[in-house]
Image (cartoon, rainbow, N blue to C red):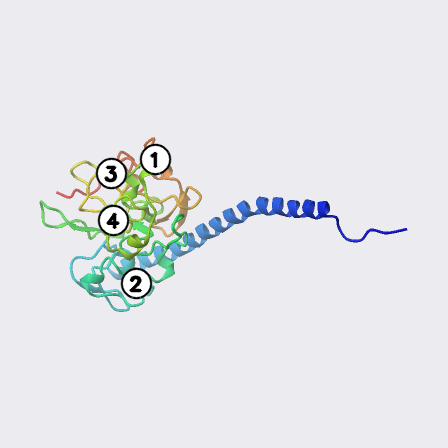
Amino acid sequence: MKTRSGFTMIELLVVVGIIFILIGMLLPAIYVAKKKSKGTLCMSNMKQVAVGFTMYADDYAGYMVAGRMPSGAYDVGNGSKFRPRWYAQIGISAKMYAFSNPDPLAAGDNTQRVDNKIFVCPQADPVTALDRDNGRNFSYGYNFQFLGNSRINSSTSRYIGWPRKISSVKKLDSTVVFADCIGTAAGKAESARMPYDAIMQGGTANGDSKNGNHAWALDPPRLVAGSSDYCNDSSRAPASRSAPYAVHSKLANIAFLDGHVDALSLEEQGYVLKSDGAVDVNGNNRMFSGTGNDDDPPAIN
């Protein structure tokens, strides 16, 4: 009597089919787990940066860092950087350096890329897979309008909203310091937004509809026509407003002044979305003002 050894072709095909089905079931779970891990790493990084922000204020008589320092080069702890933005300037106190070799020249102002990953969201652009690490077209946007707007008020010739002491903030645990930021693409319909590309990463051109453009600066939910500043001061219009970037499973990571980090939707932060996905300018500033109230941002004139 003959005994059969091995598998028939049909049996092999059945086994292979089952394997493919299992792989198909596991891949989405692995993808979700990977995204969650990046969101968790992002939170961890943001907590360190938030501590650095407070350390800077402690070293400077309680004054919070400017969104961007006035003209000239400044010490950032490991060298001089031309007009350092908020995240680079806190390095002088936190000893966490955004740039391993900061560029003191104006030519490198917008082109230098941040090479310390603590300051860069680990969730790359979903289309191009590029890290949002350009010095201007950055991962994290600062609540500069309420905490440190060092641009000049055209009427008074003084800084619009800087310097401000951290002690003037009444609600540390509910005041946003910085967040995942999409930049000027926020004011565009979702269908009109473009990926963060090599031009954005290189910082050599302005792409108003591209994710990450001027994303170092985070505009609050409500802006006042003709009075409020915008992340891009050369394009102060609702279509060019910035807002948080819901890049972590439809949520944005937000760092608060007391040092804690949370993941929230734009609506939970007071932003209003239009039917096409564009972020409106008629939100509520209670989580940005420092008072817990829906205050107007400091006026530009």
Helix or strand or loop: what does disc 2 sit on? helix
Q: Nearer the viewer, residue 253 or 237?
A: 237
| Quadrant assignment, res 191 | top left
Image quadrant where one finds the C terminus = top left
Circle nearer the N terminus (3, 1): 3
Helix or strand or loop: what does disc 3 sit on? helix
The residue that label 4 is drawn on is 144
User: Which residue type does callout 3 highlight?
Assistant: Ala
User: Which residue type does callout 1 highlight?
Assistant: Gly
The residue that label 1 is drawn on is 277
Helix or strand or loop: what does disc 1 sit on? loop
Mark 2 or mark 3, whichever is nearer to me? 3
Determine the residue positioned at 71% across, 45% down: 10
Circle nearer the N terminus (2, 3): 2
How packed mark 4 is, by other alpha carbons closer than 10 Å (few <14, some 14-19, many 20 or more), is many
Q: Position of residue 78 (x, y in %)?
A: 28, 69
The residue that label 2 is drawn on is 91
Kindly indicate whether the residue at mark 4 contacts the one at mark 3 (C-beta within 8 angstroms).
no
Mark 4 or mark 1, whichever is nearer to me? 1
